[in-house]
Image (spheres, rainbow, N blue to C red):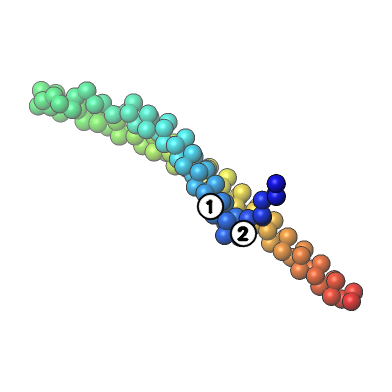
Amino acid sequence: MQPFAPPTPFEADTQNAYQLLSQARTRSAILCTPVGSCMDKCLDLTGLGQNTTKIKSINRVKEEEKEKHCLEFCAMKWDELHRRSNQVLLKKEIASIQIDMFNQMRVRAQAQMELLQR
């Protein structure tokens, strides 16, 4: 049995793109689940179908203010998680680009050394 041919540059780029897409989807699922459950805890959905005229307006405003602060806290958690995950991804991409550039420079330097030795 013959070994597989090495992937073409297009195939390698496509594979990298699919891997990044898979990582982004996984990260999104991990980040969105706790934030969504946080928001579900904040919102009082029991009174949606009830007549709000029976509730005193002061109490209703207080409850809405509590919900607002709770949702702001959930949004802050989301922003921090999103920022951290983006920083990690950015660091990985920068390191990968730097390694690629270093390897290209090394190959060019070796080629120039071979030309000079001839």
Residue 92 versus residue 16: which sits nearer the camera?
16
Q: Residue 57: x percent and y percent? A: 15, 28
Discs 2/1, front:
2
Residue drawn at the location 54% of the way across and 46% of the way down = 19
Name the image quarter holding residue 72.
Answer: top left
Marks 2 and 1, the one that precedes in the sequence: 2
Residue 114 versus residue 100: which sits nearer the camera?
114
The answer to whether 13 appears left or right of 76 in the picture is right
Q: Residue 70: x percent and y percent? A: 35, 31
Residue drawn at the location 90% of the way across and 74% of the way down = 117
As drawn, 82 above or below 56: below
Q: Amino acid at mark 2?
A: Thr
Residue drawn at the location 63% of the way across and 55% of the way down = 7
As drawn, 117 above or below 98: below
Q: Amino acid at mark 1?
A: Ala
Where is mark 2, residue-wise?
Answer: 8
The answer to whether 48 appears left or right of 97 in the picture is left
Q: Residue 118: x percent and y percent? A: 89, 76
Q: Residue furthest front?
A: 1
The answer to whether 86 appears left or right of 40 in the picture is right
Query: Callout 1: 10 Å neighbours few (<14), some, many (20+)?
Result: few
What is the distance, in whole Å, between disc 2 and disc 1 at their CAs? Answer: 14 Å
Where is mark 1, residue-wise?
Answer: 17
- Checking the image for residue 3, the label placed there is none
Q: In terms of secondary structure, where does tag 1 sit?
A: helix
Query: Callout 2: 10 Å neighbours few (<14), some, many (20+)?
Result: few
Count of marks, rendered view: 2
Q: In terms of secondary structure, where does tag 2 sit?
A: loop
Residue 88 versus residue 47: which sits nearer the camera?
88
Q: Residue 76: x percent and y percent? A: 42, 38
Q: Are marks 2 and 1 in contact (CB under 8 Å)?
A: no
